[in-house]
Image: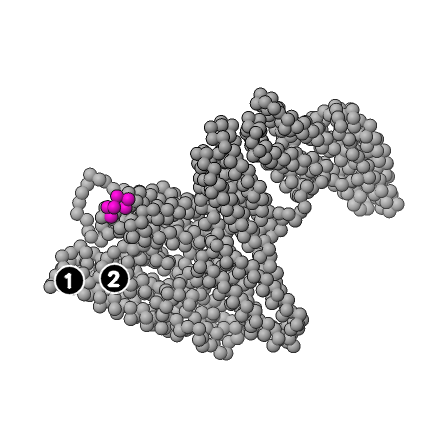
Amino acid sequence: MLKSEKMGTLTDFGQIALKWDPKNLEIRTMSVEKTLEPLVLQVTTLVNTKGPSKKKKGKSKRASALVAAVEKATENFIQKGEQIAYENPDITQEMLTAVDEVKKTGDAMSIAAREFSEDPCSSLKRGNMVRAARNLLSAVTRLLILADMVDVHLLLKSLHIVEDDLNKLKNASSQDELMDNMRQFGRNAGELIKQAAKRQQELKDPQLRDDLAAARAMLKKHSTMLLTASKVYVRHPELDLAKVNRDFILKQVCDAVNTISDVAQGKSTQPTDVYSGAGELAAALDDFDEGIVMDPMTYSEKRSRQLLEERLESIISAAALMADADCTRDERRERIVAECNAVRQALQDLLSEYMSNMTQKDNSPGLVRAIDQMCRKTRDLRRQLRKAVVDHVSDSFLETTTPLLDLIEAAKTGNEKKVREKADIFTKHAEKLVEVANLVCSMSSNEDGVKMVRYAAAQIESLCPQVINAASILTVRPNSKVAQENMTTYRQAWEVQVRILTEAVDDITTIDDFLAVSENHILEDVNKCVMALQVGDARDLRTTAGAIQGRSSRVCNVVEAEMDNYEPCIYTKRVLEAVKVLREQVMIKFDQRVEAAVEALSNNSNKDVDENDFIDASRLVYDGVREIRRAVLMNRSSEDLDTDTEFEPVEDLTLETRSRSSAHTGDQTVDEYPDISGICTAREAMRKMTEEDKQKIAQQVELFRREKLTFDSEVAKWDDTGNDIIFLAKHMCMIMMEMTDFTRGRGPLKTTMDVINAAKKISEAGTKLDKLTREIAEQCPESSTKKDLLAYLQRIALYCHQIQITSKVKADVQNISGELIVSGLDSATSLIQAAKNLMNAVVLTVKYSYVASTKYTRQGTVSSPIVVWKMKAPEKKPLVRPEKPEEVRAKVRKGSQKKVQNPIHALSEFQSPADAV
């Protein structure tokens, strides 16, 4: 701290008065604190010396060494203090006074410390040394604080120079004078920014650091706008908007300079609660979650019930506002309403349990279940609110530049009416960004992130009218070069500020929620795109395709930014490869198909559009986004995953899907373990298995998922309309997925009877598939394909039988010394293995059925196909994915070699997304 080369030379303080309070020992900077640390440590160690050492002479050699170290440190402070005093004449007297105080207290400390080191057992000498040490530390602290004020006054001196420059800029009357003043301001402002940056690093108070950082950013960011706005005002003084534009930027810069001045003097310019604090709705949910858990004996029907019900109603009111917002999807609105009703009911059930347990010391099993149910329902509501917020983010931050570019283009034409229309659109766009940013903040507990978003939104709010003013000036003077430069500067400032807001919003939005919502939105757009193609609407097709391109690009950008938070590893490599496949392969093919389709529709030549090819290209976009999401979630444990954001969540199955599976019994649940408290169903028993058994089950489930990926690429791409083979295969797959989820204690299957019924459904579907496929085999001539197809049908019958057997094995639960012991590992793994084998057989059956139906001349009198093989756009949750990127790169073809391929091998190549690209 006390280094003359660091302090610089201050020869003239000018009008700056030195405010020095010798009694004020507040340490505001880390450098003062750090400089004091060694001396404090030495003095503290010396004071804490206990009794004589074990040396034969009876004296503490360590204490003597410490005294010498304190004396040396004090002497160093004195030398540096005198050096600074003589280099800064205006502060010499105050510095020398402080140095003399250090000398005086240092000498007293030296005497007292040496006396104490000679007799460390004397309490009187110890007390004398402690008082002397306190006086020395106080004197050194005053000296350091005074030296630190030299830095402050150097900063204030630079600040006053910049203030003078701003006055000159304000009063400039010609372009030459303006440019000269601007160059001078640029140099001086740059020096001020450097000094402010050093001061920012030194400050201890985080609020002051944030204020200073914001002021530096404002000063740096607005310098260019100040130049262009001033040039417009000097060139066109007759325009009132030019003066408004210039005055706004000038005020912003002056406010930044004033903030630097206030912070340098230890004053915060912003109230601490303007931008700080967690989101209101998130905080309310947290408080409610804490309030629902209480001692039953302290429960008061009047007080506790009223408090919890009022808290919940305030949460539901806020949730209703979010549900009624414009960008909230109808489906999401319905889910929020349903979750609000569920939370209300769960609270009433919980309060009833508390009433029943008011006289009991321990919680009853019913109360424990009610608390768990309450927590689950609030978690479900929180999830839907988060996703509603991300719905808004995904839509509002999709096309952030279009409204501004439209406004600028209108301004260039000089059409004032058109500019007013575009200005209204731009204003609504800016208001929407701010509104969505505030919504995001309301559901975030990240206080630092929320503060950043609120600050960035405030900047957007203040900048918006000035961008419109710049456009209005350009409208009046479309040929003015300075007006054009001013508009360009404001456009760049707006784009930078929107990017800052976007990044800040992304920081407090979980990537899991963002990818889940983006996946659904792209799915909606893909279906709209296909529908537009089918009805021949070229305009709607191009618009929707643009939304798909924008969403896909944003997914890639967000995921790449997320991967920057990780050290490079196999995980990040896989994720970035998935991003690369989507961006460089899939989207290029999609863009080509869109351009071809739009051109064909515009020319009324619908026959030139290959509908299957377009649908396949659209499907690959959705598959690519889904593959990115799958890769991102690969490093999540089951505890980290919210059930609604998992890659294959049960909650993502629609009501239609569940009704089609028809594998579970409904809401009427029978207690399968009446003698065991805390467990009612076999699904709950699976959740109570040991961690070791859960890991073994997870390993089997992973093998099943790998098999399902093959199912995704082979089966789900086909339209099941007019193709009962595909319908039955998908139906069987859904039930098998529910079975594997059951082994992990999740999904719609609750009881052993549910699993048995599911096995029966699979067997029935397998019988129908066998009958239909044998008809196809009968029409196929004798070939290896026909033989293989019949062999796979035998496998399906075998594995359906195995599933029926394994589904009847019930998990055994025992209560040993109050601890529940669940044993059902063998039955669970057997069920998963049977499901995996059956899925493999179904995939091969579908694959060979396609070849037998389409690659051979039919035998017999029947000429029409039994099933229709047609590609389709993805359904609500399709089970399709592209091949892994590493598999794509591994394929090498030689174009010069032509040979006859087996039909099955040809089909495999046809299915590869990367090959299609």
Quadrant position of residue 281: bottom right
Whether residue 862 is situated above or below residue 618 in the rendered picture: below
> How far separated are the C-alphas under marks 1 and 2?
16 Å
Asked whether 533 or 417 is in front, the reply is 417
Asked whether 788 or 418 is in front, the reply is 418
Quarter containing the C terminus: top left
Residue type at mark 2: give it: Asn
Asked if one can make out residue 178 in the rendered structure from this viewpoint, the answer is yes
Q: Is residue 602 magenta?
A: yes
Residue type at mark 1: give it: Gln
Task: Mark 2: give few (<14), some (14-19) or many (20+) Cα within 10 Å.
Answer: some
Label 1 SS: helix
Asked if one can make out residue 73 in the rendered structure from this viewpoint, the answer is no
- The outermost residue toward the right is 124
Residue drawn at x 22%, y 59% as measured from the top left: 868
Task: Mark 1: give few (<14), some (14-19) or many (20+) Cα within 10 Å.
Answer: many
Asked whether 657 or 165 is in front, the reply is 165
- Determine which of the numbered discs, if any, sits on residue 723 in the image: 2
Quarter containing the N terminus: top right
Q: Position of residue 883 (x, y in %)?
A: 33, 49
Asked whether 76 or 15 is in front, the reply is 15
Q: Start and end of the magenta stretch? A: 601-606
Q: Position of residue 327 (x, y in %)?
A: 47, 53
Residue under label 1, please give it: 779
Residue drawn at x 17%, y 45% as measured from the top left: 899
Label 2 SS: loop
Quadrant position of residue 818: bottom right
Residue drawn at x 61%, y 73% as measured from the top left: 354
Q: Position of residue 140 (x, y in %)?
A: 79, 36
Q: How many marks?
A: 2
Q: Position of residue 567 (x, y in %)?
A: 49, 43
